[in-house]
C-alpha cells in the first residue's frame, strides 16, 4: 500500500491512488492513519459517512489531547536513571555490549579485560551503577566513571588503570524485549517457551520474531497476514471466512494454538486473530513439545506466540481510521502511559471497532466486530507483574468464502460424480452461500503473570489464564458432486459451540558455573484444562451452481442449548539445561518433558460418557549451537511433538482401542549468518509423524492399525 508521511507543517494533495495510507502526528502524540480503498467508487452515502466519522474522530482527538495536557501538567514525575533490564548470563563481552546499548551510556577503553570472563547477567529495575555492579559479580572487575561521564573497566581494588582510548555509544532500548535488527521489522531474539528469551544466534532452531514495526509497515490485520512472510507457512483457510488455518512445514496449525505471552489455550480460535493488541509475533518452525508442552489440538509443525503490547516509557496516544472496500469502516485507539516515581506502573489500552454493515471479501457479505484489550504491568526491582484482559467479537453475515473441492475422474469409473476434466474456477468474489445468516463469535480472556528475582542468578515465574468463547455459525460442507457446468450440491449444518479453558504454568530459571562450563537451567510445570460443547443440526441437501449460486431457504435455527461434549486435561513437567563451553561459543541444550493427556467425551443428548482417554509419555530434546565466529552460528536439533492418540471407532474390529500419544520427531541442521543489515538462515529438516492404516484382511470388519508414517522433508 503506498505510504506518504506528512510533516506537521505541510499539506499535500493526494489523488489517483486506490490505496492510501497517511501517517501524521499532532503535537507529536496523536498519530492518524487514514486508509482509503477504491476512491473511484465514491458516492454521496460514502461521503456522508466519511464526514460523520471524521467529525467523531476529531472529537476523540481533542479529548485525547486534553489527556496529554493533564499528563504533562499533573504531578511531576521524578527523574531517575533507573530502568528495567533483562540481560541473561553469558560471556562478559556480550553482556557488557548489550548493557551499554540498553543503558545508553558511553564506555571508554578496550574490552581486553573482559575476555574469558563470564557475567551472571542483570535483571530487574536498577540504576546504571547497581546494574553494572550486578553484571560484574564474580569477574574480579569493577566499573569506574571518569570526569567526562564515561565508564571503564579495571581490576577490582586497583588504584589506576591506563587503557587505549575507545568510545562506544548506543541509544537506550524501548523495553526489555530483545532489540530489533536494522530496519526494525525483525527482532534479534524472542521467547523460546520454557527457556525464556533467547538470541537468534544462540538458538538451535529456526526462529523469526516479527515486531510491531513490521505489523505497521505491512498494515497486517491478522496473525495470518504476518505469517505470510514465512517461507514455511501456507494459508489453508479462505480470507474473510472468520478462521485462521495455516500449516507450517506441511502440518496444520490453527489460530487457537497460538500462545498468548507464552501461555497456551488463551488465543481466540473461532475468529481471525487480530493484531490490535500484538507487539510481536514470534515463530518457531518445527515441533516444540519440550518448549511449550502439548498444544490443545496437538499441532506439531511449529509454534506461534503473540507478545501483547505493554506501556512504553514514552507516552503514546494514537488514533487510526480506515476503510476497506466500499464501506467497511474501521477505527482503532491505542493509549499507553507509565505512572509512579520511576515509571514502575504501566497501562496500555487498545480498542477497535468495525462497522457491522461493511462489505466483506465476497459479494453481499457484511462483516464487523470489535476488540478491547487492557494490559497492566508493574516493574519493581525484583518483582514484575502483568495483567492482560481482552474481549473479541466478530460477526459475518450474508455468506462466507469457501474452498471448492472437486473429485477427479477415475479411469473406467461409471460414477457420474467423477469428472474427467476440471471445471473452471468461479470468480473469487462469488458468494457460494448468498443470504446466509453467517457467523458470530465472542472470546473473552484474563491472564495474570509474575516474575520474581530471588537473586541475580535465579528467577521464578508463574502465569494463570482463563478464557471463554461462544458462538454460532451456519457451516456448509464444501460443494459436492460438482459438474463441468458448475452444478453442485451443498449441505448446511448450523453449529453452536462454547468452551472454557484454564491454563497455568510455573517455573524456575537459573544460571550457575561448574568449572569452565556455564549452565542455564529451566524447570517448568504446566496444566491446561478445557471444557467444550457443541450442537450440530444437519440440514437437507440443496442444489446450487458455483458460477450462479442459488440462495438457500428454510435453514434450521441455531440451538440455544449447547451441551457439554468433551473435557480434556494436559499436564506436564519439564527440565532443560543449556551448557556453555569455550566461553559459550558452544551451547548444548538437553531437556525432557513428562506429558500427561486425559480426555473424556460425552453424549450430547444424554450427557453419558461415551469414551475416555488417559495416557502419559516422555518427550526428550537436544540442541547444539557452534559459533566459529561472532557472526556465524551452526546449529542442529532433535525434538519431538506430541498429539493425542486416536480412539478407534465402531466401524473397526478393534473398536474402543486407544493408541498412545503420537510422537512426531524432527531432525534439523542449519546455519545462521549475519551480514550487515541481514541475518540469513538456511535449514534442512525431516519430520516424521505416526499415522493410522486400515487393514482390510480381517473379518468381519477391518482393523485400524498404528502402522503408517508421514514424513516431511525440506530446505528453508
Image (cartoon, rainbow, N blue to C red):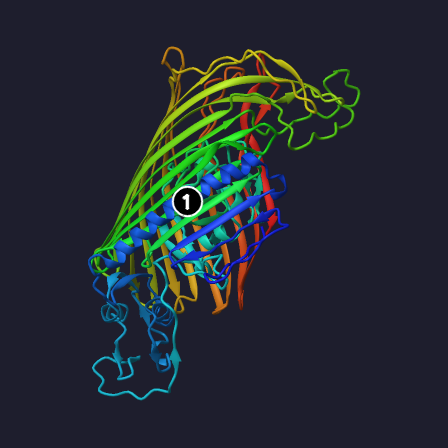
Of the pair 346 and 110, the residue shown nearer to us: 346
Of the pair 459 and 429, the residue shown nearer to us: 429
Q: Which residue is mark 1?
A: 57
Residue 123, compared with residue 548, is above or below; it is below
Tell me what residue is drawn at x 66 percent, y 18 percent.
544
**Residue 525 pos. (x, y %):** 30, 42
Of the pair 277 and 419, the residue shown nearer to us: 277
**Residue 694 pos. (x, y %):** 59, 23
Image quadrant of residue 571?
Answer: top left
Q: Is residue 258 left or right of residue 402?
A: left
- Residue 274 visible, this orientation: no
Residue 73, compared with residue 226, is above or below; it is below
Residue lying at the far right of the rendered structure:
412
Numbered disc total: 1
**Residue 310 pos. (x, y %):** 34, 51
- Residue 554 visible, this orientation: yes
**Crowd around label 1: few <14 · some 14–19 · many ≥20 (10 Å):** some
Tell me what residue is drawn at x 77 percent, y 15 percent.
414
Q: Is residue 412 left or right of residue 559?
A: right
Of the pair 550 and 233, the residue shown nearer to us: 550
Image quadrant of residue 262?
Answer: top left
Secondary structure under the numbered disc 1 in the rendered image: helix
Residue 251, compared with residue 70, is above or below; it is above
**Residue 542 pos. (x, y %):** 62, 14
Amino acid at each position: 500500500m503506498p505510504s506518504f508521511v506528512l510533516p506537521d507543517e505541510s499539506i499535500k494533495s493526494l489523488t489517483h491512488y486506490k490505496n492510501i495510507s497517511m501517517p501524521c502526528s499532532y503535537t507529536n502524540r496523536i498519530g492518524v492513519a487514514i486508509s482509503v480503498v477504491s476512491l473511484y467508487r465514491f458516492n454521496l452515502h460514502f461521503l456522508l459517512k466519511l464526514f460523520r466519522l471524521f467529525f467523531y474522530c476529531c472529537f476523540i482527538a481533542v479529548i485525547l489531547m486534553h489527556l496529554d495536557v493533564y499528563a504533562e501538567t499533573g504531578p511531576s514525575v521524578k527523574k531517575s536513571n533507573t530502568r528495567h533490564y533483562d540481560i541473561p548470563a553469558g560471556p562478559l563481552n556480550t553482556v557488557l555490549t548489550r548493557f551499554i546499548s540498553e543503558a545508553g551510556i558511553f564506555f571508554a577503553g578496550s574490552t581486553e579485560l573482559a575476555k574469558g570472563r563470564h557475567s551472571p547477567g542483570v535483571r530487574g529495575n536498577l540504576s546504571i551503577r547497581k546494574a553494572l555492579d550486578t553484571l560484574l559479580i564474580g569477574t574480579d572487575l569493577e566499573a569506574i566513571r571518569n570526569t567526562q561521564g564515561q565508564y571503564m573497566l579495571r581490576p577490582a581494588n586497583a588504584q589506576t588503570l591506563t587503557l587505549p582510548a575507545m568510545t562506544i555509544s548506543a541509544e537506550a532500548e524501548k523495553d526489555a524485549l530483545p532489540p530489533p535488527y536494522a530496519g526494525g521489522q525483525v527482532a534479534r531474539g524472542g521467547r523460546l517457551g520454557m527457556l525464556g528469551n533467547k538470541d537468534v544466534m544462540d538458538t538451535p532452531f529456526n526462529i523469526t520474531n516479527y515486531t510491531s514495526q513490521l505489523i505497521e509497515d505491512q498494515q497486517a490485520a491478522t496473525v495470518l497476514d504476518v505469517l505470510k512472510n514465512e517461507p514455511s507457512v501456507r494459508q489453508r483457510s479462505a480470507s474473510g471466512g472468520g478462521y485462521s488455518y495455516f500449516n507450517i512445514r506441511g502440518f496444520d496449525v490453527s489460530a487457537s494454538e497460538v500462545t498468548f505471552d507464552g501461555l497456551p489455550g488463551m488465543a481466540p480460535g473461532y475468529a481471525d486473530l487480530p493484531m490490535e493488541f500484538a507487539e510481536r509475533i514470534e515463530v518457531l518452525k518445527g515441533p516444540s513439545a519440550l518448549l511449550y508442552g502439548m498444544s490443545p489440538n496437538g499441532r506439531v509443525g511449529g509454534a506461534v506466540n503473540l507478545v501483547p503490547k505493554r506501556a512504553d516509557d514514552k507516552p503514546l496516544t494514537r488514533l487510526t481510521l480506515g476503510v476497506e472496500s466500499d464501506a467497511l469502516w474501521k477505527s482503532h485507539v491505542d493509549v499507553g502511559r507509565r505512572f509512579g516515581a520511576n515509571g514502575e506502573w504501566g497501562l496500555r489500552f487498545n480498542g477497535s471497532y468495525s462497522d457491522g454493515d461493511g462489505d466483506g471479501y465476497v459479494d453481499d457479505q457484511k462483516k464487523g466486530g470489535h476488540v478491547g484489550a487492557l494490559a497492566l504491568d508493574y516493574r519493581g526491582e525484583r518483582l514484575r507483574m502483568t495483567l492482560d484482559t481482552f474481549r473479541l467479537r466478530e460477526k459475518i453475515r450474508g455468506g462466507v468464502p469457501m474452498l471448492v473441492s472437486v473429485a477427479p475422474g477415475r479411469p473406467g469409473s461409471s460414477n457420474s460424480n467423477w469428472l474427467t476434466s476440471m471445471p473452471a474456477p468461479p470468480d473469487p468474489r462469488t458468494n457460494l452461500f448468498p443470504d446466509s445468516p453467517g457467523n458470530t463469535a465472542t472470546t473473552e480472556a484474563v491472564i495474570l503473570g509474575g516474575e520474581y528475582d530471588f537473586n541475580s542468578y535465579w528467577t521464578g515465574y508463574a502465569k494463570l489464564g482463563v478464557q471463554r468463547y461462544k458462538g454460532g455459525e451456519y457451516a456448509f460442507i464444501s460443494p459436492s458432486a460438482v459438474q463441468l457446468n458448475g452444478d453442485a450440491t451443498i449441505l448446511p449444518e448450523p453449529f453452536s459451540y462454547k468452551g472454557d479453558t484454564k491454563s497455568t504454568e510455573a517455573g524456575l530459571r537459573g544460571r550457575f558455573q561448574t568449572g569452565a562450563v556455564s549452565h542455564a537451567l529451566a524447570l517448568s510445570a504446566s496444566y491446561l484444562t478445557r471444557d467444550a460443547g457443541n450442537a450440530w443440526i444437519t440440514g437437507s441437501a440443496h442444489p446450487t451452481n458455483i458460477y450462479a449460486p442459488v440462495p438457500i431457504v428454510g435453514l434450521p435455527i441455531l440451538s440455544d442449548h449447547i451441551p457439554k461434549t468433551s473435557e480434556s486435561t494436559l499436564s506436564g513437567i519439564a527440565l532443560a539445561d543449556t551448557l556453555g563451553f569455550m566461553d559459550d561459543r558452544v551451547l548444548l541444550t538437553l531437556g525432557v518433558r513428562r506429558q500427561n493427556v486425559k480426555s473424556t467425551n460425552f453424549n450430547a443428548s444424554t450427557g453419558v460418557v461415551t469414551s475416555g482417554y488417559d495416557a502419559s509419555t516422555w518427550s526428550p530434546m537436544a540442541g547444539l549451537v557452534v559459533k566459529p565466529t561472532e557472526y556465524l552460528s551452526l546449529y542442529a536439533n532433535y525434538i519431538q511433538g506430541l498429539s493425542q492418540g486416536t480412539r478407534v471407532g465402531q466401524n473397526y474390529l478393534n473398536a474402543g482401542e486407544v493408541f498412545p500419544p503420537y510422537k512426531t520427531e524432527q531432525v534439523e541442521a542449519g546455519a545462521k549468518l549475519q551480514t550487515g543489515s541481514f541475518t540469513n538462515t538456511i535449514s534442512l529438516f525431516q519430520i516424521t509423524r505416526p499415522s493410522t492404516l486400515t487393514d482390510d484382511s480381517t473379518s468381519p470388519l477391518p482393523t485400524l492399525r498404528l502402522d503408517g508414517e508421514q514424513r516431511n522433508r525440506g530446505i528453508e
